[in-house]
Image (spheres, rainbow, N blue to C red):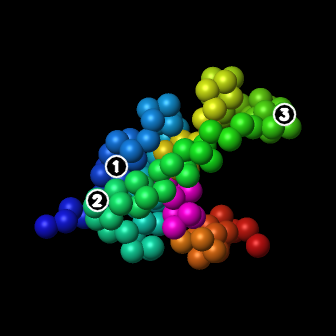
Amino acid sequence: MQEKLTPNSVYQELSKTFPKQNDFGESDYIEELKELLFFGIETKEELEKLLLKHKNNILTIDREPLDEQHVKWYNQDPSIDNLENKVENNYWFALPALLRISLELEFGDEYEKFANERDQID
């Protein structure tokens, strides 16, 4: 029997799949679970399959260097911790963002529309 996702199991799958350096920030994974369920990802096995399918692309996106303007903007944002380390080691996204990138890669325009409505972006 396949194990249904919970907020904790979402975190466990993400932390198992992606580097420890991306395990920062705060999330209870409730919102992330709701997004997964909305797109029909209901079990740990389905989540694992999704993450592994897109893992290399996600990590490539995460490693893309920031341009100087973004570094400047992020330096002015007090909520961003360890920016120098992130820039030096070429990583930027926390686990929830990596999950959302996987959803965008899998569901394309459908996820983009969903995210824009979630974030109230026209």
Q: Tell me how far mark 1 sits from mark 3, CA to CA.
A: 33 Å
Disc with the residue nearer the chain's start (2 vs 1): 1
Which structural element holds mark 3?
helix
Dot label at residue 44: 2
- The reply to whether the magenta stretch includes residue 53 is no
Badge 1 amino acid = Glu
Q: CA distance from mark 3 to mark 2?
A: 39 Å
What amino acid does circle 2 point to? Lys
The residue located at (60%, 71%) in the rendering is 108
Residue 5 screen position, x and y as percent: 29, 61
Q: Amino acid at mark 3?
A: Glu
- 38 up-or-down from 102: above or below: below
Residue furthest right as drawn: 69
* Residue 93 or residue 33, whichever sits in front: 93
- Mark 1 or mark 3: whose residue is earlier in sequence: 1
Mark closer to the chain start, 3 or 2: 2
Are the residues flagged by discs 1 and 3 in contact, CB closer than 8 Å? no
**Residue placed under numbered mark 3 in the picture:** 68
Q: Which residues are magenta?
A: 99-106
Q: Are marks 2 and 1 in contact (CB under 8 Å)?
A: yes
Q: Quadrant of the N terminus?
A: bottom left
What residue is drawn where x is 62% and y is 47%?
61
Asked whether, in this view, residue 85 is left or right of residue 94, the answer is: right
Chief secondary structure of the magenta portion = helix
Where residue 28 appears, x then y in whole percent? 42, 49
Name the residue beneath numbered marker 1. Answer: 13
Task: Answer whether residue 64 is visible to the viewer in this image.
Answer: yes
